[in-house]
Image (cartoon, rainbow, N blue to C red):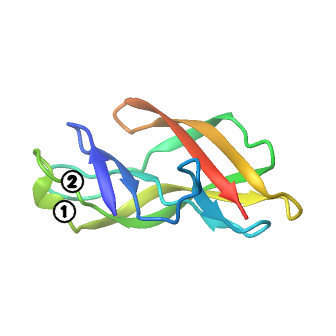
């Protein structure tokens, strides 16, 4: 899992997932699936900080989304939080479920807010099979 992190310890986690032709994650029709991209924050001592929150800014056309807390492994890479690599913390995760009869592309957008007020826009693409 790769986390893209800001200066204040906010991260976007991306796991290695099956990709659809359009670059979206492949998900089974009608099956609730946690998407690989999650959001988390740790302080400089690698302690989890209150997980980010989000609101949907564009709902999926062919399914639903549920936000939940899931554990993620930090992989900050270069920067002031590199020493936190491998630490586990609570992350904001998105669970997508398509309509059972739908096959094809879908997606949604969200606005993610970190505890320090930072806001990031998130775009999720899925390919339903």
Residue 15 rendering spot, x and y as whole percentages:
41, 62
Q: Is residue 81 left or right of residue 114?
A: left
Looking at the rendering, which quadrant does residue 119 occupy? top left
What residue appears at the point 60 percent right and 47 percent down from the top-left corner?
A: 125
Quadrant assignment for the C terminus: bottom right
Q: Disc 2 on helix, strand or loop?
A: loop
Disc 2: which residue = 76
Q: Is residue 111 left or right of residue 62?
A: left
Mark carried by residue 85: 1
Q: Are marks 2 and 1 in contact (CB under 8 Å)?
A: yes
What residue appears at the point 41 percent right and 64 percent down from the top-left corner?
A: 16
Q: Disc 1 on helix, strand or loop?
A: loop
Q: CA distance from mark 2 to mark 1?
A: 6 Å
Quadrant assignment for the N terminus: bottom left
| Identity of the residue furthest to the right in this view | 101
Residue 2 rendering spot, x and y as whole percentages:
31, 58
Please report whichever mark, 2 or 1, sits nearer to the chain's N-terminal start.
2
Q: Residues within 10 Å of mark 2 (few under 14, many from 20)?
A: many
Q: Residues within 10 Å of mark 1 (few under 14, many from 20)?
A: some
């Amino acid at each position: 899992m790769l986390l893209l992190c800001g200066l204040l310890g906010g991260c976007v986690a991306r796991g290695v997932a099956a990709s659809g032709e359009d670059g979206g994650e492949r998900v089974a029709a009608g099956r609730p699936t946690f998407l690989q991209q999650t959001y988390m924050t740790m302080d400089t001592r690698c302690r989890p900080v209150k997980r980010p929150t989000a609101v949907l800014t564009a709902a999926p056309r062919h399914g639903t989304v549920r936000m939940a807390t899931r554990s993620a492994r930090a992989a900050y890479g270069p920067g002031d939080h590199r020493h936190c690599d491998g630490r586990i913390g609570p992350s904001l995760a998105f669970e997508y479920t398509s309509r059972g009869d739908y096959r094809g592309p879908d997606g949604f957008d969200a606005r993610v807010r970190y505890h320090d007020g930072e806001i990031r826009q998130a775009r999720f693409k899925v390919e339903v099979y």
